[in-house]
C-alpha cells in the first residue's frame, strides 16, 4: 500500500514509524514532513493546509490511504476533499472536526447532552464579555473559540488579567478570527489526564492514558508550550475513573456527535480534569495529541494501519486494540528561548546505539546529509520500560546522547506522576 501522512511534526513521525511496522506498506509520503523523518518516509514539500495540492498529489501518485494528522487541515476539510476522489482517510471530516475547531460548539454540545464540563458563557461582543467578568471571581479561564496553535487559552489569576485576555483576543485579534468569539469558563482543579480514543462513530476504544507537561520550565513554571514531555500511563487515571469516563463522557460524546449528524471517525482526544466532583472535559481535540502520541503509540502492541483502516470502513472492534503493560516517557528537546524567540540552524547529532525512539519535530536538511534545527520544539526522546520510574530514568539517560547547540529540556518530566505512584 502507498500511504500519505499529512503533517510535519513529532506526532507525524511517531505515526509514520508505527505505520511502517505493517508489512503491506510499500511507501509512505509525508506532506510536508521534515528532514528528521527522511529515513522513514519520503518528504514532499506541500504544506498541510494546501488542500488542492494534497489532493492533486494523491491522485497523481495513486495513494491508497491517507492519514490527516493536524487540526488545521481536518477543520479545513482535507478528509472531505480526499474522500471525494475516492481516497479513504483516517481522520474526521470537517463537520466532525468542528469539535476542536470551535470551542463554542464543543461547550454547547456538552451542555446539550449532559457531558460534564466547566460551567461557562460564550461571547461575541467585547463589552458584554467585560460586563460578565465583573460578576465572577478569579481564577477564571478565557478561551478563543477557534484554532490558535494550542495557545488560545488564558488562565487568568485576576479579573484584570481576564479583561486583558478579552482585549487581546477580541480587540487586538492576537489569534485572528479565532478570537471573534470567546468562551469564559470556571477554573477547574485536579490532576489533568489526556485520553486518546479510536472511534469509527459506532465503536469507541480508548488508548492508554497519558500526562502532558505544558509549561516550559521545571516545576511547571514558565510559559505554556505545545508540550515539553509526556508519560504514559497516567497514574491518576484509575480503572474506576476510566469506567466512569467511558460511561459519562466518551460514549455520550460519540453518540452526541451522531445525533448532531456529525459522525466522528478518527482519533478523538479527551483532555480531562479529575476534579473533586468527578472527571470533567477541559477540551476535545479532533486528532492525536502532540506529544501524547509519542508515548501512546510506542505502547501499542496492535497494528496501527489495520486499526486505522477499520476506523475508515467502520469495522472497528475493541479486540483489535491492545496496549502493553509497560510505561513510556518522552522528553522534548527545544530551542533555547521557546516558546518565544529562539535561533535555529544548529546541527542535530544522535549517537549510535540510542536505546530510545527519537521523534523529530522541527528539522531541515543541512550540508553533507546533516540535519539542522528548524523549530521551537525540535525533537522528543521516548523510552519504554517495565515501570514508569525505569522509563523516566532511561529517557533521561538517552536524551544525553542527542545534541544540538542552544538545546534545553525539562529535567522533571514524570516527577509528579512518580510522586502519585509513591503515595498509593
Image (spheres, helix red, strand yellow):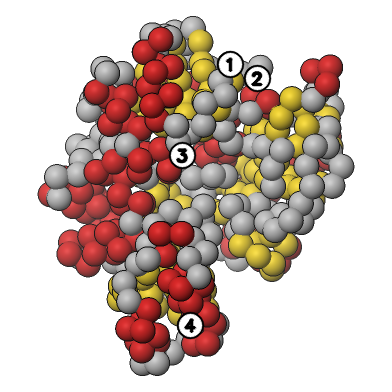
Marks 1 and 3, how far apart at CA: 18 Å
Q: Quadrant of residue 135?
A: bottom left
Pointer 1 with pointer 4, Cβ within 8 A: no
Q: Nearer the viewer, residue 341 or 197?
A: 341
Label 1 element class: strand
Q: Nearer the viewer, residue 271 or 103?
A: 103
- Horizontally, residue 205 falls left or right of residue 349, namely left
Gap in Å between the C-alphas at discs 4 and 3?
31 Å
Image point (47%, 29%), residue name = 6
Placement of 196 over or under 224, stated as above or below: above
Q: For numbered disc 3, what is the local secondary structure?
A: loop
Which residue does the numbered mark 3 point to in the structure image? 70
Q: CA distance from mark 1 to mark 4?
A: 47 Å
Task: Please determine whether, in this image, residue 94 is positioned above or below residue 155.
Answer: above
Q: Report the mark closest to the observer, 1 or 4.
A: 4
Q: Position of residue 232 (x, y in %)?
A: 55, 46
- Label 2 residue SS: loop
Tell me which label, 3 or 2, sits earlier in the chain.
Answer: 2
Packing grade of label 1 (10 A; few <14, some 14-19, many >=20) is: some
Q: Which residue is mark 2?
A: 38
Report the Cα–Cα distance between label 1 and label 2: 6 Å
Residue 269 in picture, x, y percent from top left: 40, 48
Label 1: which residue? 42
Mark nearer the N terminus (4 vs 2): 2
Q: Estimate the spatial distance between the alpha carbons at disc 4 and disc 2, rounded to whole Å.
A: 46 Å
Instruction: Please say if the residues under marks 1 and 2 sit with CB atoms less than 8 Å apart.
Output: yes
x, y percent for residue 241: 37, 58
Amino acid at each position: 500500500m502507498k500511504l500519505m501522512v499529512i503533517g510535519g511534526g513529532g506526532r507525524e513521525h511517531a505515526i509514520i514509524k508505527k505505520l511502517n511496522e505493517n508489512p503491506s506498506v510499500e511507501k509512505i509520503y509525508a506532506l510536508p514532513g521534515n528532514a528528521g523523518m527522511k529515513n522513514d518516509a519520503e518528504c514532499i514539500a506541500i504544506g498541510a493546509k494546501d488542500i488542492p495540492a494534497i489532493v492533486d498529489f494523491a491522485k497523481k501518485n495513486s495513494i491508497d490511504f491517507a492519514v490527516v494528522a493536524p487540526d488545521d487541515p481536518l477543520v479545513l476539510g482535507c478528509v472531505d476533499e480526499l474522500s471525494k476522489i475516492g481516497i479513504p482517510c483516517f481522520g474526521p471530516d470537517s463537520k466532525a472536526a468542528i469539535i476542536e475547531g470551535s470551542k463554542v460548539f464543543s461547550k454547547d454540545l456538552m451542555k446539550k447532552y449532559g457531558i460534564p464540563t466547566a460551567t461557562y458563557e460564550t461571547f461575541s461582543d467585547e463589552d458584554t464579555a467585560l460586563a460578565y467578568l465583573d460578576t465572577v471571581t478569579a481564577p477564571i479561564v478565557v478561551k478563543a473559540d477557534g484554532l490558535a496553535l494550542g495557545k488560545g487559552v488564558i488562565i487568568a489569576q485576576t479579573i484584570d488579567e481576564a479583561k486583558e485576555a478579552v482585549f487581546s483576543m477580541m480587540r487586538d485579534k492576537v489569534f485572528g478570527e479565532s478570537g471573534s468569539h470567546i468562551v469564559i469558563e470556571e477554573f477547574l482543579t485536579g490532576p489533568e489526564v489526556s485520553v486518546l480514543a479510536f472511534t469509527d462513530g459506532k465503536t469507541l476504544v480508548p488508548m492508554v492514558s497519558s500526562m502532558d507537561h505544558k509549561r516550559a520550565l521545571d516545576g511547571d513554571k514558565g510559559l505554556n508550550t505545545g508540550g515539553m514531555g509526556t508519560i504514559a500511563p497516567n497514574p491518576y487515571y484509575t480503572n474506576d475513573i476510566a469506567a466512569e469516563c467511558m460511561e459519562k463522557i466518551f460514549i455520550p460524546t460519540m453518540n452526541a456527535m451522531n445525533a448532531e449528524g456529525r459522525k466522528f471517525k478518527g482519533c478523538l482526544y479527551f483532555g480531562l480534569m479529575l476534579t473533586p466532583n468527578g472527571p470533567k472535559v477541559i477540551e476535545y481535540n479532533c486528532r492525536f495529541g502532540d506529544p501524547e502520541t509519542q508515548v501512546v503509540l510506542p505502547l501499542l502492541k496492535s497494528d496501527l494501519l489495520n486499526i486505522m483502516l477499520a476506523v475508515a470502513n467502520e469495522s472497528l472492534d475493541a479486540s483489535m486494540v491492545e496496549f502493553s503493560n509497560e510505561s513510556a516517557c518522552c522528553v522534548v528537546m527545544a530551542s533555547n528561548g521557546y516558546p518565544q524567540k529562539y535561533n535555529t540552524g544548529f546541527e542535530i547529532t544522535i549517537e549510535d546505539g540510542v536505546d530510545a525512539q527519537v521523534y523529530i519535530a522541527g528539522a531541515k536538511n543541512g550540508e553533507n546529509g546533516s540535519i539542522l534545527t528548524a523549530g521551537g520544539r525540535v525533537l522528543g526522546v521516548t523510552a519504554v520500560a517495565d515501570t514508569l520510574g525505569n522509563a523516566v530514568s532511561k529517557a533521561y539517560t538517552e536524551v544525553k546522547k542527542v545534541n544540538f547547540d542552544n538545546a534545553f529540556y525539562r529535567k522533571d518530566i514524570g516527577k509528579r506522576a512518580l510522586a502519585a505512584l509513591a503515595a498509593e
